[in-house]
Amino acid sequence: MSDVLEYLARSLVEHPDSVEVTAVDDDRGTILTLRVHPDDMGKVIGRGGRIARAIRTVVRAAGSREGIGTIVEIVE
């Protein structure tokens, strides 16, 4: 799932080399942490959080196809 998240984030931002995705397994599932360049935070979050919500939905859907529960956290 980290590959899907990384692909989506890299296609949205202006600084694709600064995209970092880390995965941690938890009792709730896999927690994916996304870090981007500070100038790209607005592009990843979007107006009213719409893009962030869409990213979470796509990653959750990709994880459910493989039977993995995923949670996406976007941090600075």
Image: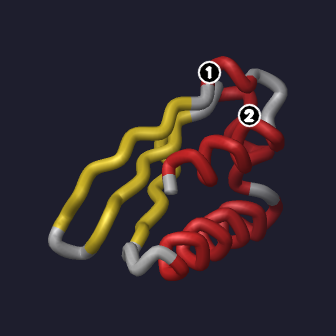
Discs 2, 1 touching: Cβ within 8 Å: yes
**x and y, in percent, of residue 46 in the image:** 78, 57
Tell which of 18 and 62 is nearer to you.
Answer: 62
**x and y, in percent, of residue 11 in the image:** 82, 40
In three-dimensional space, the C-alpha distance between marks 2 and 1, rounded to whole angstroms, equals: 10 Å
Tell which of 22 and 36 is nearer to you.
Answer: 22
Q: Give me the residue at 54% from left, 80% from top.
A: 65
16 to the left or right of 65: right
Disc 1 target residue = 18
Q: Give me the residue at 42% from left, 53% from top.
A: 32
Disc 2 target residue = 40
70 to the left or right of 48: left
75 to the left or right of 7: left
Q: Is residue 11 above or below residue 5?
A: above
Name the amino acid type tagged 2.
Asp
Q: Is residue 49 above or below residue 17?
A: below
Name the amino acid type tagged 1.
Ser
